[in-house]
Amino acid sequence: FEPGKYVADLQTHWAAEGGNASYALLTRCFLLINSTQSRIKIVDTLVNMLRVVIEADPSSLLPTVWLATNSISPPYISLELGLGGSAISKALKTVCGLNSKSLKSLYDKHGDAGDVAFEAKKKQSFTLRKAKPLTIKGVYQSLVKIANTEGTGSGEIKQSVVNKLLQDARGAEESRYVVRTLCQHLRIGAVKTTMLIALSRAFILSRPPGADFELRSQQDLAKLKKEKLAEVWSKPEDIVKACFAKRPNYNDIVTVLLEVGVCDELLVRCGLKMHIPLLPMLGSITRDLSEMLTKLQGRNFSCEYKYDGQRAQVHCDTDGKVSIFSRHLELMTDKYPDLVALISKIRGDGVDSFIIEGEVVAVDQDSGELKTFQTLANRARKDVAIGSVKIEVCLFSFDLMYLNGESLLERPFRERRELLRSLFTEIPNQFTWVKSIDATSQDPEAVLEFFKSATEMKCEGIMVKILDNLPNVSLPDGLTEEVSAVTVVQNTGKGKKKIEKDKYIPKKFGRRKALLATYEPDKRLDSWLKVKKDYSMTFDTLDLIPVAAWHGQGRKSKWWSPILLAVRNEETGSLEAVCKCISGFTDTFYRANVEKYNKDEGINVLGGKPGYVEYEGGHPDVWFEPQEVWEIAFADITISPTYTAAIGLVSDEKGLSLRFPRFLKVREDKSIEEASTNDFLAGLWRKQEEKAPTKSADDYNE
Ligand code: ATP
């Protein structure tokens, strides 16, 4: 860590009129971030920019965090900019004096609206009025105004705010980032985790005016060795990440951080709260049942049907108010009035407030037959009136995270499940528990039978969850009662004594001893494993972004085929090409795809290869505007001299590619920010290498 890095540089940009942090500071930070691929440098730059804001103008910290994470509110508060691309084009024409032809040629050349704004501003030869320097607060407030403007005349009002932002943007760089922000495609590799890390470090290093918490001086930190520094960072990072996982709203976290800094009180003040969704716990992928059984040796686990529906987090408070959130934390209470009505009926005696989680699945409520995900997807998304519901659903519940004012996250899964199943009332084909069996690795036959029954019931496979914090081993006498995730109570002659649980776990369980049965929001751990039917037929899947294509041959000459697919690099924000795909598409799909990415009409296509795509293996006929995620099955991952995906993670010169990629479906539920990453791909490759001998680059056959 370089505490002073860029601080002086950033400080020269900080102040705008009235002592408010200027947008120039943020622009400078974005530029510095864009000039490097190193995650360490990205974090350092962000830390130092945040420090400047915390110390010089703390009231701008919250807007800074929102703008740097390219959002203005958490997903569960619907605050959409609702700007079409035409608003930006109009503003560029008005402010920079461009005509349609020159604007189009800039778009054709650069593809990215921000880059177009950069060039347009450079060419601008006049000013409409005296520009007022943009401040971070001012830009954020403008975005909020755009989002909140509704009704008649809202188009003009939004347009005038956009025009004003572009007029006031000083120079080409500010224009670039203002426009990228308006398009909600900032392209700096500062995603959520980076921001949380940077916030925690910035607070350790800064002393906000009036704050009474003790902070380390940067000189102290500069003297520390790398390992020691990692230790100093790690606890505050964990605290901030844990807060965000339970309360994913910067409005709350930043406000409390400014009051108390990074400390345990933050955890208390930003814990679980009714009607604010927590980030869901995630499952790790396993290739097949045998890998799952190996991983969970020595543990008691529950195998559950993995239903093909939509994940729902249901909050119900003492007054009976219900909120339902999606996997990505969007509020979908309006989509499911039938579920809202159901919730009052499932609440058993003594249940006051609660948060449960389950999968909403389309069903035939008379026969209980499960319907496909596609059927559920056909249900209207908003403002559904209860009488007009045509696609009936059942909520298959699988977890209980909060009960009567108390968080249950720290309790083992067996206990949470017991509470769920004993305190709530089942209503056949409307509200029930996920079908499950309890097993251990000693019961492969039973697990296989269960897996088969899941696939016969149109489920995607099974979810396997550890039930208890401790492995299934006999403990020394007196060591029985679990009091928390990490301690047990021993009855000694003189009374009860708390002991670190790990001490009693035999070494043969290796790292598995660390697996707890607690609910870990936002974590993908081996305590929840997914075994999908595709995997057990030895096909893995990835969620990839289509970025380019070639004209098809023969019958397919009017269509795009093959299509070039990419993974995301979270650190740099770039898209790394991973394979060309030609199979799994239907003719109908090809036809629709040509309409969607129509080069002649200039729809969703770029003028050339955008700088953020990494691919040197050829010259596609068309470059797509990245906007979709496709689920792709494949047989193997191979080291590739042609593709750059995960380059630097498994080899310095070579990337990874997929053998026999096959299109499965468009992931309508995923945005490109949720596509598979280069890290994830490298992880899958490592797992594959553990199981099978390495395929050399020579084996690679495109
Ligand atoms: P992820 O949600 O893990 O990021 P993903 O979107 O690709 O990845 P899947 O691989 O399909 O999702 O698996 C996880 C999803 O399975 C959960 O988010 C949930 O919606 C669904 N699911 C179905 N049945 C269960 C169950 N019994 N327990 C947990 N999740 C379940």
Image: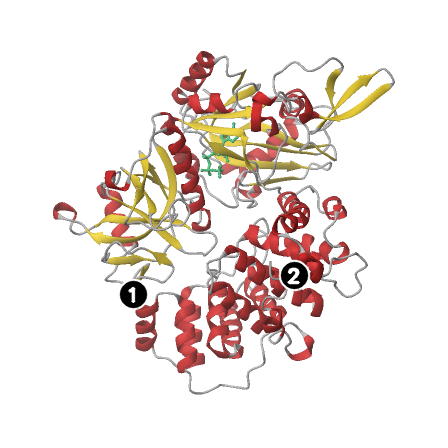
**Farthest residue, direction left:** 554
Residue 677, visible in the rendered structure = no
**In the picture shown, does residue 204 fall above or below 113?**
above
Which quadrant would residue 469 be assigned to in this image?
A: top right
Q: Secondary structure at mark 1?
A: loop
Which quadrant would residue 113 be assigned to in this image?
A: bottom left
Instruction: Tell me where residue 281 appears, x and y as whole percent.
Output: 57, 36
Mark 1 and ligand 1: say if the CB distance to the nearest ligand atom is below 8 Å. Answer: no
Instruction: Tell me where residue 351 appears, x and y as whole percent.
Output: 72, 28
Residue 226, visible in the rendered structure = yes
Among numbered discs 2 and 1, the one appearing first in the sequence: 2
Mark linked to residue 607: 1
Q: Secondary structure at mark 2?
A: helix
Mark 1: amino acid: Gly
Mark 2: amino acid: Leu
**Farthest residue, direction right:** 494
Instruction: Tell me where residue 338 appears, x and y as whole percent.
Output: 55, 34
**In the picture shown, does residue 664 fall above or below 139?**
above
What colour scheme does the image use? Answer: secondary structure
Q: CA distance from mark 2 to mark 1?
A: 37 Å
Circle 1: is it few (<14), some (14-19), or many (20+) Cα within 10 Å? many
> Residue at horizontal 77%, vertical 54%?
260
Circle 2: is it few (<14), some (14-19), or many (20+) Cα within 10 Å? many
Mark linked to residue 62: 2
Classify residue 113 as left or right of residue 425: left
